[in-house]
Image (spheres, rainbow, N blue to C red):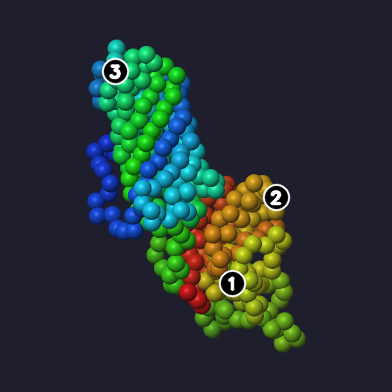
Amino acid sequence: MRQSRVLLLLPLLSLLARGPAAGAPPPQTPLVLTAAGMLTQDGAVLPWPADPGLQLALGAHVRATVTASSPSSTAEADLVSYFNAVAADDGFLLLQPGTGLVLVAWHGLWTNQQGFLIQGDVVGQRKGIVSQTPPVIALAGNAQLQGLSGKGRGIVVNATWTGQLNTQTGALNVTLAGPAVGELGPPPVVCGDYTDPNLAGDIQPLMMRPDGTPNQDHFSHDANDPYPHPFPYSTNPPTSGPHNPSPLPWGVYDTPQDDESLVHNLEHGGVIVSYQPSLAPALVDRLRGLVALYPTDVVLAPRPANDVPIALTSWGRLQKFTAYDEPAIQNFIDRNRGHGPECFD
């Protein structure tokens, strides 16, 4: 465990050597983030391998409330508010015996006011003494924040920061400033095939007709319908095959829906998010919040036949989740929407 923590510190230290990403494309929104919270340290103190004159203090925890604003009068309010969050970072302190803290590094997840996730990587150095009584030091460094879920998924903030730390109480106040690069999502649908590269999930063999062509037949539901009902699809949940003549309206359903209709939604390039009815209500609410970001192309519904708590399907693609993974679930939706035999972008 100690070795993995030391290895994690190395990429964080590289943030000290770089500023905002070179050539970052527009649009950019200038942001100022103020964080007020506490720094605590409850781990082991070890010799720092790169410099035996320093000590590595494990178990540094930062908990802070982050408030966002923008100096630009044209900044989109929803983008700014996305970065109002609670920060929860775990990292390291480098200490010099006799003089105290030299460097800080934190990596963790922030939760914004809508409950969506932001990844934070923050490093900094001691810059001087603010006061002896109380014992307050000045810090400064670089940070990178990345939206992991919600409308801000994929937005990156490369910031510089300054702050003050009371080394006796752990009280920490930080101001970060830098551009937010990217736009609020979801991204537009880009139509394509289920075999296109960079799609999420595992490719599933398509159900075929006897002549070897993909089976996209419509059921007739009369005496001449050659198909049994319910139809025995080849994957659980279904990812292709014959289906009802009409798809379901996009959106959230509280009750299980007919697989034979949902497959028609897949044919239209939709993504189906299904879950076992026993899934914790709090996680169902999180799924509702994600799917609410998409006015079209996504259906959420319970499905008792699922063999895992959560499963995502698009035409010819399947990803199963044994545990809730919000960034991965939204990644599947963003990448796979529109990748079906019939796409209406």
Q: Which residue is drawn at 29% across and 58% down?
A: 25
Residue type indicated by callout 3: Gln
- Numbered tag placed on residue 200 in the rendering: none
> Could you say where residue 291 lies in the image, as x and y percent from the top left?
57, 59
Inter-mark Cα distance, 2 to 1: 25 Å
**Residue ID for mark 3:** 96
Q: Is mark 2 on a helix, strand or loop?
A: loop
Q: Mark 1 points at which residue?
A: 265
Q: Where is residue 206 in the image (x, y as percent from the top left)?
A: 53, 72
User: What residue is shown at x 29% (from left), y 20% (from top)?
Assistant: 129
For the point 74% across and 85% down, which residue is it?
222
Residue 272 is drawn in which quadrant? bottom right
Q: Which of 290 and 277 is in front in this view?
A: 290
Disc on the earlier residue, 1 or 3: 3
Q: Which of marks 1 and 3 is in front?
A: 3
Depth order, front residue of 33/153:
33
Q: Is residue 71 above or below residue 227?
A: above
Q: Which of marks 3 and 2 is in front?
A: 3
Chain-order first, disc 2 or disc 1: 1
The three-letter amino acid code for the residue at tag 1 is: Asn
Residue 259 at x, y percent in the picture:
66, 68
Q: Would you say residue 48 is visible in this rendering?
A: no
- SS under mark 3: strand
Secondary structure of residue under mark 1 = helix
Who comes first in sequence, dot 3 or dot 2? 3
Q: What residue type is labelled 2?
A: Ser
Q: Where is residue 191 in the image (x, y as percent from the top left)?
A: 44, 72
**According to the image, label 2 marks what residue?**
278
Q: Can residue 256 be seen in this view?
A: yes
Q: Are there few (<14), some (14-19), or many (20+) residues within 10 Å of tag 3? A: some
Give the residue drawn at x 59%, y 50%. 286
